[in-house]
Amino acid sequence: MDSALIPKGVKRCPMWQFLLGLGIMGAVLAWGVYAMLLCWFKGLNQTNMNDYYGFALWIWADLAVIAVGGGAFFSGLLKYIIGKDELKHIINYAVLIGFICYSSALLILAIDIGQPLRGWFIFWHANVHSMLTEVAFCLSCYFAVLTIEYIPLILENRQLDKVPFFHNLSHNMHETMAIFAATGAFLSFFHQGSLGGVAGVLFGRPFAFREGLLIWPWTFFLFTWSAAAYGPSFTLLITWITEKVTRKKLVKDNVVDLLAKISGWMIFTYIIVKMADTSRWAFITAPGLGQTLADFYTGNDFYGYWILFAEIILGGVVPAVILISPPLRRKPAWRVTAFILGVMGVSLNRWVMVLQVMAVPIMPFDNWALYIPSWQEVATTILPVAYGVILIMISYRYLPIFPQEVELNPIQDESPAAVEAETESTPDLQPAKA
Amino acid sequence: MFPFSFEWTWETTRMVFMGGLWYALGILGAGMTYCILKAAIDASKGTQGNSHH
Amino acid sequence: MKNEHNDNPPVMKFGMAIDLDKCTGCGACMVACMSENNIPFKEDESDKLVSITWMRIFKLSNGKSFPDTDICYLPRPCQHCEGHGGHSPCVSVCPATATDYSRETGIVSQIVTRCFGCRYCMGACPYHARYFNWWDPVWPDGMEKYLSPNVSPRMRGVVEKCSFCFHRYQLAKNKAYLDGERRVPEEAYQTACTQACPAGAIVFGDLNNPEHQVHQIVKPDPKHGGRSQNPRAFRLLERLGTNTKVYYLSSREWVRRSGDNYLEHEKTGQASQPHH
């Protein structure tokens, strides 16, 4: 039915299966869109946010997707600037995942602000001293970079590529990609950093506040570093999930191994610095303001010392050790465990730097404030996940996302059992030149 | 924000920040303009870029 | 105003001294504030996490059991932090310049028509003095006729907070100009809460003006970031470096200690090293 659109030399599931998948994810998406419209038309009273929790689930989701979406800029930096050429086999997917993460982040921000129609004020009346201004500017610009990186991939669709203008445009964009990637890395450094700065500059909140270098608190550098470290792990985790769902090997082991190793060393170095930062904050910064760790981790029903352990040891040290050790890294079960722990660790870090910051009382006579999100918040947070799955499904079906797929899955070698669900493929398929 | 916005002041931080922003936007804009124009010219000449894989 | 430019108007720092030993917790200040500033309310105001109270009274306890138990009421308006050179926690973070620190009056303003509701300022304020309009204001039938014409009601989706009744300052300033006076007289500009307090616990005025009662009570020390030289006085969370303009007074040591965080061995009033 749509075989003319499917890349040459690869097989895709039958149309009904594809549409069924789209339908299921579409239903989840519709649920999220309904909640989103409720928030836009009825206001943020649809959420369980309150005056103690001005930042809540969405801002965490925003920070988390941007952190794990960091795989796009860091892979781009490694491939185009540092010259790790093997990564060209996974860069398309890293870009797609980054594109999904960043478009989701922008959508979440558009739902999160109280007056969405005034959103442009952040650009027009910009206070250049605010970390959030830096976030908004660099985030929007970097999203433009990701769009620029995603466009040539779309243009490589078999039918679009036949149009000479599109073919040439895609070619030219590939040729100049290093410049775009460098700009993207520059913008990413600042917006990832300024997201860390958002919490770090809050000198009214000792739980979040950090000293730093010039105008940048230490969290600025920690956020950039952690996004570069954990982002590739997320890219590899999603790649692994995609391989399981499609029941195909899509990226060669040496590519996965290289990116996993880099991610591992980045996490390893990050977590050492994170421990140093935590120690300085726990033993110097906070006591200097009359507070101790016990003020931050006791006296409530949820936030305990376990969260420090889960973030730093379970989500930092453990994945770092697994990924920097060649024998462990090469075992898929260990490797994937490390990816999952890593993604959990960086997400937990963002949770702590947003939600726990809001929860901890500051005035001695104030109380802990815990909050449970409303269904509208949950639905709008799941919305980007459904949107992401749909975009991956469509992109995987119609675009040559994985350059090694044809080589790794030669059609003539497949047994009848493996292709029984793949009857839609055209008989005249030729393996593309890899 | 532009220098003709009423809140604009010629202070260093503002110039560095907005300078960085316009520099990045300039690169993206110029890069895309180059790619699109070159593609249009090549397409009209009938030349095809090589495959990039 | 040309005259003012030529005359170099005096730099003012409006602030408050609230005597906690006088405060009975009656709530008149809260009511006066709501009425003066057209603060919206809902049918059910029991959830204080979503109700707007520019002036809010906290109840403090010494935590001891009878007969040693003691309580204290602490009214908390916006503290109008100066931070270090106008770098107050909320002003520095607002991405759209919707809140500003006035170097003329020391008042932290909130431009509600500029605010787009990102709520970063609420996260930055350690006093929870900033409130979000989760709903559009709905006034009981006929009540809109009683709203103050000097303060715009706010719409859903923006942040608001105590302005030290800034509209009263504007009116007083205009009157002073017409009367040919260079300064706004002390009695011409008073906040609604100050005037409503039956116990006279709140004193408001210019902290920079030695003739004003608030200056005489507080005796701010400009060499030490505005710290009070009155042994009864303290500021909320002074150690954070917020450099607020609301001073509290109490003769009770436990009350003064409740105003800030201290390690067990530290003395009340212990200062911190400035960090920014």
Image (cartoon, coloured by chain):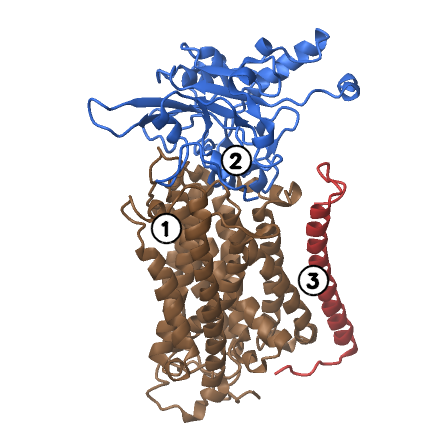
Query: Subunit of mark 1?
Result: A
The correct choice, above or below, for A395 with respect to A293 in the image is: below
Indicate which disc residue B28 carries. 3
The correct choice, above or below, for A255 with respect to A352 in the image is: below
Q: Is residue A34 visible?
A: no
Element carrying mark 2: loop
Indicate which disc residue C242 carries. 2
- State which chain is coloured blue: C
> Where residue C102 appears, x then y in whole percent?
63, 28
Q: Tell me the quarter of the image containing the N terminus of chain C.
A: top right
The reply to the same-chain question for discs 1 and 3 is no
Q: CA distance from mark 1 to mark 2?
A: 35 Å
- State which chain is coloured red: B
Q: CA distance from mark 3 to mark 2?
A: 41 Å
Q: Quickly name the residue at label 1.
A: A378
Q: In this rendered view, identify the residue nearer to me: C263 or A392.
A: C263
> Where residue A203 appears, x then y in whole percent?
51, 43
Q: CA distance from mark 1 to mark 3?
A: 36 Å
Q: Residue furthest bottom?
A: A413
The reply to the same-chain question for discs 3 and 2 is no
